Image: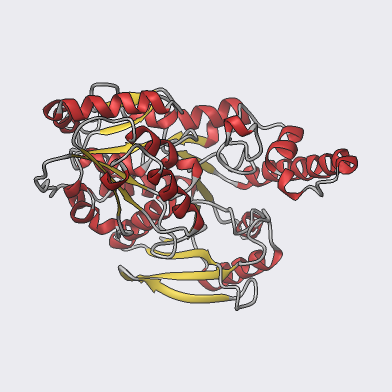
């Protein structure tokens, strides 16, 4: 088949979970003999918006990348020049299937270009972006004592006041005008998104939690919604050999942003007693990374020296660069994640995971079975669970040995098996 993957970023330019999974899927499909191309984005402020250029995947030159430039309009949800470039790619490549991973920073309306040509569309859900304009149900503007407050559901006025107030004039007498403008903007966005959803033939959720939430809270039709966990190149995670150290080492893998809860992890680590180390992997994000280091430097005397800031790693080298250097992985996200890749990868490498007791995080980590759960957003409870592992290293190791709870042998889903499932999905739609 000729498959066009659509994703808002692609490794190594963008290296978060949905991007990494998209590449893994593309590599697996290409290995099966399919012709796989990718429509994605970059942000080059020295070139025109919408300009399209071409590359090949650094790991498989058979995979062609169409890279649309979008440095100045990335916060729009639809962009005509991106739609036009996408239409050109459809005409040039003439795919059998369009498989979307994310449309943020691209254009939602590109789905209409595929439908004009009667091309089936599959959409893998990675977050809440279709039913939450910001994607994570976290409020950007909340009380100072509750930064990044959780949101319990999408409402137009609440979106305006809690997430788009950054665009208000700031004049008190204009407040209601500003709220009315953005309330209307959100309403138009959500109306448009529902039209976009109608164009999609099938939605795939990598967590049962995510599938049920989209169906219940957003009204996603059940006959267009299926559950299928992510697939992984398992052999890359099977060669872990922990390098011996005196201290118990926790690891964090991810972006240096508030949603990931890394600030709370640092604060919790400051409460952990005994011989422990925290290693933080991820791309330096300038001011955000500096702010996190400032939090680390404010910890009780000596704790900052026990935090090591590691360089960004390539996902294909995650065992050598990460898992060989940790005794546990912590996923402290303050947004309700659905199916974090790092949880699966750690489980395949037999590394125990500490994460929050909510969403897809708790779906894949079972308390005192293959890891530990802490009360979501509770720094104190996170510290308590981390302390339990430091105090009983052997027990922590035994939790890691269980691996993935939905298989008898602890193995996570293999990408080769998932490719067969994806092929059947494509064939069914065709």
Let me know if residue 308 appears in the view. Answer: yes
Image position of 68 with respect to 286: above or below: below
Relative image position of residue 37 (x, y in whole percent): 44, 66
Relative image position of residue 327 (x, y in whole percent): 19, 39
Left or right of 312? Residue 318 is: left
Relative image position of residue 349 (x, y in whole percent): 19, 43
Of the pair 404 and 114, the residue shown nearer to us: 404
Left or right of 287? Residue 60 is: left
| Quadrant in which residue 55 is drawn | bottom left
Left or right of 363? Residue 225 is: right
Screen quadrant of the N terminus: bottom left
Image position of 380 with respect to 133: above or below: above
Of the pair 127 and 54, the residue shown nearer to us: 127
The residue depicted at 55 percent of the width and 44 percent of the height is 201
The residue depicted at 18 percent of the width and 50 percent of the height is 235
The residue depicted at 16 percent of the width and 49 percent of the height is 324
Of the pair 108 and 253, the residue shown nearer to us: 253
| Number of numbered discs | 0
The residue sitting at the front extreme is 301
Relative image position of residue 104 (x, y in whole percent): 58, 53
The residue depicted at 48 percent of the width and 43 percent of the height is 126
Let me know if residue 219 appears in the view. Answer: no
Q: How is the image coloured?
A: secondary structure
Of the pair 153 and 410, the residue shown nearer to us: 153
| Quadrant in which residue 273 is drawn | top left
């Amino acid at each position: 088949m000729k498959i066009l993957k659509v994703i808002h970023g692609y490794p190594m330019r963008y290296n978060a979970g949905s991007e990494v999974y998209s590449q893994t899927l593309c590599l697996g499909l290409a290995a099966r003999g399919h012709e796989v191309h990718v429509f994605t984005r970059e942000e080059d402020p020295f070139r025109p918006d919408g300009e399209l250029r071409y590359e090949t995947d650094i790991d498989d030159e058979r995979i062609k990348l169409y890279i649309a430039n979008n440095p100045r309009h990335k916060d729009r949800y639809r962009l005509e020049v991106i739609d036009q470039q996408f239409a050109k790619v459809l005409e040039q490549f003439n795919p059998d299937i369009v498989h979307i991973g994310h449309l943020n920073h691209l254009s939602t309306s590109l789905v209409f270009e595929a439908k004009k040509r009667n091309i089936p569309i599959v959409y893998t859900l990675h977050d809440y972006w279709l039913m939450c304009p910001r994607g994570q149900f976290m409020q950007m503007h909340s009380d100072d004592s509750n930064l990044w407050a959780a949101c319990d559901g999408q409402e137009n006025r609440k979106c305006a006041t809690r997430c788009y107030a950054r665009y208000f004039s700031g004049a008190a007498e204009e407040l209601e005008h500003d709220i009315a403008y953005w309330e209307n903007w959100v309403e138009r966005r959500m109306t448009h998104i529902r039209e976009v959803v109608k164009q999609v033939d099938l939605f795939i959720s990598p967590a049962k939690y995510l599938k049920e939430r989209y169906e219940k809270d957003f009204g996603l039709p059940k006959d267009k919604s299926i559950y299928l966990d992510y697939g992984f190149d398992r052999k890359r995670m099977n060669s872990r050999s922990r390098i011996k150290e005196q201290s118990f080492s926790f690891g964090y893998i991810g972006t240096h942003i508030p949603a990931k809860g890394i600030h709370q992890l640092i604060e919790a680590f400051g409460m952990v007693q005994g011989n422990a180390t925290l290693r933080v992997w991820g791309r330096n994000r300038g001011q955000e990374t500096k702010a996190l280091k400032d939090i680390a430097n404010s910890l009780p005397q000596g704790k900052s020296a026990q935090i090591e800031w590691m360089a960004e790693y390539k996902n294909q080298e995650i065992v050598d660069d990460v898992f060989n250097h940790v005794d546990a992985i912590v996923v402290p996200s303050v947004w309700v994640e659905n199916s974090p890749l790092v949880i699966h990868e750690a489980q395949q490498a037999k590394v125990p995971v500490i994460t929050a007791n909510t969403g897809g995080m708790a779906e894949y980590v079972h308390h005192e079975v293959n890891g530990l759960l802490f009360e979501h957003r509770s720094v104190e409870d996170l510290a308590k669970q981390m302390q339990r592992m430091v105090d009983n290293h052997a027990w922590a190791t035994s939790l890691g040995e269980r691996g993935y709870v939905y298989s008898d042998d602890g193995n996570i889903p293999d990408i080769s098996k998932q490719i067969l499932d994806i092929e059947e999905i494509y064939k069914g739609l065709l």
